[in-house]
Image (spheres, coloured by chain):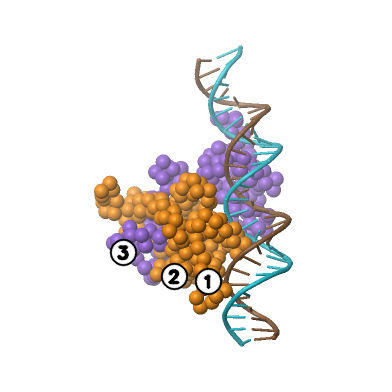
Chain colours: A orange, B purple, C cyan, D brown
DNA sequence: ATATTTGGGACAGTCATGTTGACATATCTG
DNA sequence: CAGATATGTCAACATGACTGTCCCAAATAT
C-alpha cells in the first residue's frame, strides 16, 4: 500500500490541546478560524474536477446529497441545501441536461420528483468524493479516532437542535 | 444564571463515537456533512446583524480578521481571505465609507496600508463575534474540553501543511 | 541614478449563485 | 369539489467572486 499507516498514526494531534478554560475568547476564536480554514480547504479540493466539467460548488452539493440519499425528493433536497426551489431549479436543470441526475415520479405521492444519479452521475460524484475523502482521511488519520469523536461532537453542537435529526437521518 | 453549567456539562458528547474503523466511507461522509452543517449554522448566526447594517458575509470576514490582527496589511488580509485585491477592494471601500475600518501608511514599508477597526468598527465586530461565540461556546460546552482538542486537531489536519503557519500565526 | 519589482487602488465586464415575486400545473386531502 | 401541497418556470435583482487592464508610489536591484 502507498499509505500503510495513515489509519494508525503512532502519535495523534500535535495540536495545542484545549485548556480547561476552553470557553475563553481566544479558544472560541481559534475554533472559528480553524472551522473556516478547514472547511474552505476541504471544499476547494474538488474545484479542479468541477471546473473541468463546467460545474460549480452548488452542483457539487446537489450531487453529494443525491448520492447520499438516492431517491430523495426535490423538497427534501431543498431542505438539506437551505436554498429556494428557484435556485435549486437551475442546478437540477444543468445536472439533468448533462444526464448526471434523473427524476422519477414519487411512489406514494405522484407530485413528488424523486432524484437519483445516473451511472455517469455516480461516477462523477465518486471522483468528487475521492477528493474530499483524501483531505478528510488524512485529517482523521493524523488526529486519531478519539479526536474524530470530538470533531463530530463539537460540530453537531453547532447545529441547532431542531436541525439535528435531519443531519442524523443521512446516516442510514 | 440562565445557563449555569454550560462550561461544566456533566455528560459530554451524546454523539455516536467514532469506531476504530473511522476511515470507512460512512465515517468520512459523516465528517463532511457535519462540517458543512456546522459551518453554515455558525456563519448564519450573524446574518441578521449584518443585514441590518447593509453588509454581507464578505464584510464580516474582513472585519473578523482585522479585529483579530489589528494593523495587518492589505496583502496579508488578501492572503487570509483567499480572494483577489479587486474583490477585497470593494469590501474595504464599503467598510471605510461606513467608518468601520481605517488605514495607515506602513511603518517599514510606506507602500503598505495597515488596517485597523475604528471604535465603531470594533463595536460592530464585537456584536458579530458575540453571535458566533454563542454558537461555538454552546457546542464546546456540550461536547467538553477533550472534544474541543479533537475538533481542533481534525480541522488543522484539513488545512494543507503549507497553510498551517498562517492559521497558527493568528494565535498571538 | 536609473530600471525593475512590489503594494495598493481603480475601472470594466463577466460569472456563479443566491434572492423575491408571480404564475401554472398536477396531485393529494378534507 | 375546494383548498393545500409539490414542483416548475420566467423575470428581475443582489452578492461576491473572477479576469484584464492601467496607474501610482515606494522599495529594491542593477
Q: Nearer the viewer, residue B44 or B167?
A: B44
Q: Tag 3: Cα neighbours inside 10 Å, few (<14), some, or many (≥20)?
A: few
* Residue wearing tag 1: A105
Residue, disc 2: A169
Question: Residue A78 placed where, x, y %?
Answer: 55, 65
* Residue at 54% over, 67% down: A74
Nearest to viewer (mark 1 / mark 2): 1
Determine the residue positioned at 59% across, 61% down: A89
Res A129 label = none
Q: Report the front residue among B125 and B45.
A: B45
Q: Residue at x 57, y 58 (%)?
A: A93
The front one of B158 and A21 is B158
Residue under mark 3: which chain is it in?
B
Spatial CA distance of label 1 from label 2 is 22 Å
Which residue was labeled with disc 3? B19
| Crowd around label 2: few <14 · some 14–19 · many ≥20 (10 Å) | few
Element carrying mark 2 = helix
Chain on which label 1 sits: A
Question: Are the numbered discs 2 and 3 placed on the same chain, yes or no?
Answer: no
Give the percent coordinates (x, y) of residue A39.
Answer: 47, 53
Q: Where residue B84 sits in the image (x, y, percent)?
A: 57, 40
Q: Secondary structure at mark 3?
A: loop
Mark 1 and mark 2, same subunit?
yes
Amino acid at each position: 500500500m502507498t499509505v500503510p499507516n495513515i489509519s494508525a498514526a503512532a502519535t495523534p494531534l500535535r495540536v495545542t490541546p484545549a485548556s480547561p478554560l476552553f470557553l475563553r475568547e481566544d479558544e472560541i476564536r481559534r475554533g472559528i478560524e480553524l472551522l473556516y480554514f478547514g472547511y474552505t480547504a476541504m471544499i476547494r479540493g474538488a474545484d479542479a474536477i468541477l471546473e473541468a466539467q463546467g460545474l460549480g460548488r452548488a452542483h457539487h452539493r446537489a450531487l453529494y446529497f443525491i448520492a447520499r440519499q438516492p431517491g430523495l425528493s426535490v423538497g427534501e433536497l431543498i431542505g438539506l441545501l437551505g436554498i429556494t426551489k428557484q435556485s435549486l431549479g437551475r442546478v437540477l436543470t444543468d445536472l439533468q441536461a448533462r444526464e448526471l441526475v434523473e427524476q422519477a415520479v414519487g411512489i406514494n405521492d405522484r407530485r413528488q420528483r424523486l432524484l437519483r444519479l445516473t451511472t455517469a452521475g455516480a461516477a462523477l460524484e465518486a471522483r468528487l468524493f475521492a477528493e474530499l475523502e483524501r483531505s478528510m482521511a488524512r485529517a482523521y488519520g493524523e488526529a486519531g479516532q478519539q479526536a474524530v469523536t470530538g470533531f463530530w461532537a463539537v460540530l453537531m453542537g453547532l447545529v441547532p437542535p431542531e436541525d439535528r435529526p435531519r443531519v442524523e437521518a443521512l446516516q442510514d
